[in-house]
Amino acid sequence: MSVLENIKEFKILLNKTDCRLVAVSKTKPVGLIKEAYEAGQLDFGENKVQELREKPGQLSADIRWHMIGHLQTNKVKYIAPFIYLIHAVDSLKLLTEINKQALKNERIINCLLQIHIAQEEHKFGFDESGLVELLSSQEFISLQNIKVAGLMGMATYTEDHDQIRSEFRKLKKLFDEIKGTYSASNLEMQEISMGMSDDYRIAIEEGSTMIRVGSKIFGPRIYH
Ligand SMILES: *Cc1c(COP(=O)(O)O)cnc(C)c1O
């Protein structure tokens, strides 16, 4: 199937749901992004700052660029002028730097806090107590050029659908708790970014508002 057909299929799937598609175009050429854009896709996700520095200038200005990967503090400045949403914020230090760069650019940058929901050790993110500590801190409340718009998580890489479902359910529950408990001018809990090519159906059933889908749209990635 072509990129165009894949985008159309996702449109049909997500029609009448509260979930939107972030098309993950990492490693893929701008030609394929154009194809998706022409099918009506406006949200694109990248996980490398380098690609976010190269691609937008070659593409339509109304594309919403999402940074979905692990972001290093010293690279925030490169994407701060234009980034639409940063999905994987995993420390107060990073949030503070995003705030600083957003201020320089006279904008408010939307962020999602990454929550560690998987069993794997290596995945980034806050655990529940780390999240509570962050949201209760004066440092967080004082950051006026960021907005925390929700949470993001990645399930364990496994064939076990029950396990994936229970991890997504955990993220949704935490989202609801935070939404019902915390209030701050820079906190507006709306988005749950969860679900990728192999598990987006489960994620939608469990309350995802943003699925991040790459290979299912653009084909398998080849890393050199
Ligand atoms: C690559 C990536 C995706 C998309 O992965 P696919 O399995 O190709 O859909 C989603 N989220 C993050 C954080 C990624 O790095």
Image (tube, rainbow, N blue to C red):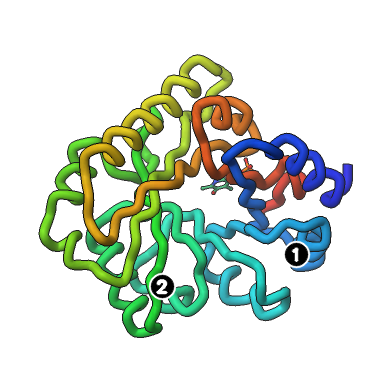
Q: Quadrant of the rendered structure where residue 131 is? A: top left
Q: Which residue is mark 1?
A: 29
Where residue 159 appears, as percent x and y from the top left, is: 58, 20
Q: Residue at x 45, y 28 (%)?
A: 168
Q: Residue at x 62, y 36 (%)?
A: 17
Where residue 14 appears, as percent x and y from the top left, is: 68, 38
Q: Residues within 10 Å of mark 2 (few under 14, many from 20)?
A: some
Where residue 32 appears, as percent x and y from the top left, is: 80, 60
Q: Is residue 169 above or below residue 123?
A: above
Q: Is residue 164 above or below residue 171?
A: above
Q: Which residue is mark 2?
A: 75
Any part of residue 224 in sight: no
Q: Residue at x 17, y 67 (%)?
A: 142
Q: Quadrant of the rendered structure where residue 46 is? A: bottom right
Nearer the observer, 29 or 187: 187
Q: Quadrant of the rendered structure where residue 39 is? A: bottom right
Give the farthest residue toward the front: 16
Q: Secondary structure at mark 2?
A: helix
Indicate the amino acid at tag 1. Pro
Q: Residues within 10 Å of mark 1 (few under 14, many from 20)?
A: few
For the residue with label 1, is its CB less than 8 Å from the closest atom of ligand 1?
no
Q: Residue at x 11, y 60 (%)?
A: 138
| Direction from residue 185 to residue 167 in the image, left or right | right
Where residue 118 appears, as percent x and y from the top left, is: 40, 31
Alpha carbon distance from label 1 to label 2? 22 Å
From the image, which quarter does the C terminus lie in? bottom right
Nearer the observer, 200 or 110: 110
